[in-house]
Amino acid sequence: MAAETAAGAWVLVLILWGAVVGGQNITARIGEPLMLSCKGAPKKPLQQLEWKLNTGRTEAWKVLSPQGDPWDSVARILPNGSLLLPTIGIQDEGTFRCRATNRHGKEVKSNYRVRVYQFPGKPEIVDPASELTVGVPSKVGTCVSEGGYPAGTLSWHLDGKPLIPDGKGATVKEESRRHPGTGLFTLQSELTVTPAQGGPAHPTFSCSFSASLPRRRALNTAPIQPTVRGEHREGVQLVVEPEGGAVATGGTVTMTCEVSAQPLPHIHWIKDGMPLPFPPSPVLHLPEVGPQDEGTYRCVVTHPSHGTQESRAVSISITETGEEGSTAGSVSGSGLGTLALTLGILGGLGVAALLIGVLMWRRRQHRGEERKVPENQEDEEEHAELNQSEEPEAAENSAGGP
Ligand SMILES: *[C@@H]1O[C@H](CO)[C@@H](O)[C@H](O)[C@H]1NC(C)=O
Ligand SMILES: *[C@@H]1O[C@H](CO)[C@@H](O)[C@H](O)[C@H]1NC(C)=O
């Protein structure tokens, strides 16, 4: 009611202003009466005046005079020369002109350009999402505004700031329909976002309708606040080797937890829902598996700033059960034993290689000393060959010596 009164007062203000200024733009609310004054028209009846209209209802110009019939229920001229449209509609948009002869016999013209408007109902977000998933394009909801004219626009806000669709993090699918009977618009805007890692856990989305009219405040929806889920599967990849997780007794299984986050978060492992007692590592290596290793494994990623993420579950199955539980207790021990043995052999080989190296170096050094004071002829020949470029003749001489 207050809005209607305000709109009425607004129209009146425009009419009064129009009486002063020559031509005027008028904005009128659909369904309300509109009165346009004919400037210069004498207050007495039977004035010399004429109204000309070019609107959605007319073909070219339609002329109305005080002496003529009123135009159905569309428009009529009042005794003081003003034109009254009792119920204005979309079809009444157009140009209105009045030409009157005033008391002094002077012609006065009025010129109006009329536009109409209708405010839609309060916009609403239908199908609001309750959860969004990090890294996954998720539908936030569809903002709907019904019954507005002219169309206007819908826009989204995230945490109070305008959300500009960029086609990557946020996309908007818009649709505009017109009611066939009333000509009023229904707008829809479907928002899809891909929440970024490390973003807010409870973002607030709202939508607002802006009329394509000046001096009008936007209409806002009630905000919605979905929860951003971190424990999505997509951000954490669990790779198992051998693929499929089926392995023969005594074989080896390696599971690798791949995370794109930087800095690398803390990663631990769970088997059948229970944490495994290993130091945090992105790799879980199970050598010489036995039946006790069968089960469901996941890696759990703990980010320093925001919660944990669990990988998909991987099922490890042991295909051959040749040896029964007897090996069960010793699997990890024998695994370590094999590792120790391997390391021992490698270490031994390393030491041997080092010793050989040292020995050869010592021998070289020894020869180097010999070169300075040659005693052995064979050594001397070798030396000569090595130093041909330096002293070829001297070498030959000494080679062909006594
Ligand atoms: C009326 O509106 C038209 C466009 O719609 C604009 O060009 C013109 O300047 C306006 N006139 C006044 C007096 O505001
Ligand atoms: C013309 O008459 C109507 C109703 O009688 C009145 O509301 C309006 O203010 C008048 N207009 C002018 C310009 O005098």
Image (spheres, rainbow, N blue to C red):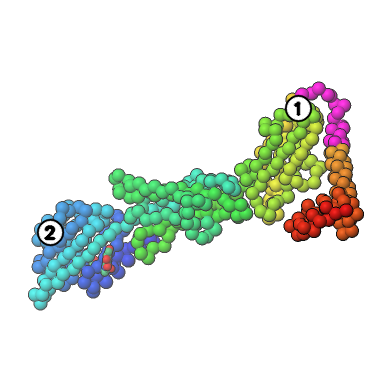
Judge left or right: residue 242 versus residue 375: left
Q: Which image quarter has ligand 2? A: bottom left
Neighbours of disc 1 within 10 Å: few (<14), some (14-19), many (20+): some
Quarter where residue 305 is shown: bottom right
Q: Nearer the viewer, residue 275 or 68?
A: 275
Place of residue 246 in the rendered image (x, y in percent of width and height, measured from the top left)? 71, 29
Q: Residue at x 58, y 47 (%)?
A: 135
* Residue 323 can be seen, yes or no: yes
Relative to 43, say whether 178 is above or below. above
* Residue 87 can be seen, yes or no: no
Place of residue 239 in the rendered image (x, y in percent of width and height, measured from the top left)? 67, 39
Place of residue 73 in the rendered image (x, y in percent of width and height, measured from the top left)? 20, 53
Quarter where residue 348 is shown: top right
Judge left or right: residue 309 versus residue 329: left
Residue at numbered disc 2: 63
Indicate the amino acid at tag 2. Val
Say what secondary structure mark 1 lies in: loop
* Residue at the right extreme of this rendering: 375
Quarter where residue 238 is shown: top right
Residue range of the region highlighted in magenta in the rendering:
320-338
Q: Residue at x 87, y 32 (%)?
A: 330
Judge left or right: residue 197 versus residue 92: right
Q: Earlier in the sequence, mark 2 or mark 1?
A: 2
User: Residue 248, labelled with which disc?
Assistant: 1
Place of residue 358 in the rendered image (x, y in percent of width and height, measured from the top left)? 88, 50
Indicate the amino acid at tag 1. Ala
Pair 2/1: label in front: 1
Q: Residue at x 47, y 51 (%)?
A: 167
Label 2 beta carbon less than 8 Å to ligand 2: no
Relative to 399, say whether 315 is above or below. above
